[in-house]
Amino acid sequence: MDTATTPGLEILFTRQQIHERVAEMGAEIIRDLDGEKLVMVGVLKGAALFLADLARAIKADATFDFVAVSSYGAGQRSSGAVRLIKDLDEPIEGKNVLIVEDILDTGLTLAYLRKLLLQQRPKTLRIATLLDKPSRRIEKIDADYIGFSIPNLFVIGYGMDYAEHYRNLPDICLLTPEHPE
Ligand code: IMP
Ligand code: MG
């Protein structure tokens, strides 16, 4: 699937813009690590592509783990309750942990995850999000590293989905009225 050949899409951030911003984020993260090791915790599934690229921009000793969460209730509106579907594989006590998320929206997901991971007493716990939609926030939470801050738009591509589709688009896109469905 590619952006130019898929009808009903408008590019918000090109693959080149994403690549450059992710490289900058990697450099910021390395600087803050001070030569220590890192555990990157990706939030499935949306953050998978971002984590893959961010990991390659972090020239340090980094390991991966993944969690999966789901919010109760159907549809695009979250009911507010988040539950864990997949837990960490390895303990994180005493480690430098970076949660890697695709979008910080209402903040419900990351507030839940932060609380959960803090119970394990990591040495540090930071958050990297590719996109931030500050206008939608319900829970008071900020990311330490933000790729792009955007208004209240629904985006797809580069890991992010509409009904599980479009995750493999290389660019971050908006659906236009010409979009079929
Ligand atoms: P929050 O708990 O409201 O912050 O939810 C964040 C999650 O909602 C993200 O990890 C995404 O999976 C999903 N999400 C929020 N906005 C969008 C969007 O514009 N496109 C695709 N998924 C989104
Ligand atoms: Mg997500």
Image (cartoon, helix red, strand yellow):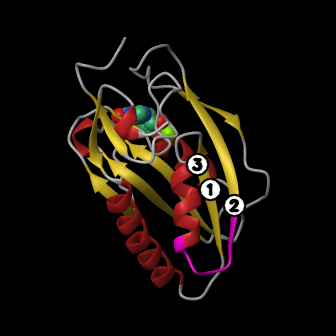
Q: Is residue 12 visible?
A: yes
The vertical placement of 161 against 124, above or below, is: above
Residue type marked 1: Val
Residue 158, placed above or below residue 179: below
Which residue is outermost to the front? 5
- At x 53% / y 62%, what residue is drawn? 53
Three-letter code, disc 2: Phe
**Distance (Cα) linking label 1 and label 3:** 10 Å
* Residue 75 as seen in the image, left or right of residue 64: left
Which residue corresponds to mark 3?
Answer: 48
Secondary structure state at the residue bearing disc 1: strand
Residue 44 coordinates in the image, percent (x, y): 60, 41
Give the structural element (helix, strand or loop) at label 3. Answer: helix
In the drawing, does residue 5 fall left or right of residue 60? left
Task: Tell me the residue that label 2 is attached to.
Answer: 64
Task: Name the quarter where the C terminus is drawn.
Answer: top left
Query: For the residue with label 1, is its CB less than 8 Å from the closest atom of ligand 2?
Result: no
Q: Quadrant of residue 129?
A: bottom left
Pointers 2 and 1 in contact (C-beta within 8 Å): yes
> Considering only order in the chain, which callout, 1 or 2, is on the residue closer to the N terminus?
1
Look at the image and tell me whether residue 106 can be seen: no
Query: Who comes first in sequence, dot 1 or dot 3?
Result: 1
**Of the image marks 3 and 2, the number of the one nearer the N terminus:** 3
Amino acid on which disc 3 is placed: Ala
Give the residues drawn in magenta, as a range. 57-63
Q: Is residue 116 above or below residue 39?
A: above
Q: In the depicted view, which residue is nearer to us: 4 or 158? A: 4
Q: Nearer the viewer, mark 1 or mark 3?
A: 3
Q: Which residue is mark 1?
A: 41
Foreground residue, 171 or 56?
171
Verify CB contact (< 8 Å) between mark 3 and mark 2: no
The furthest residue to the right: 90
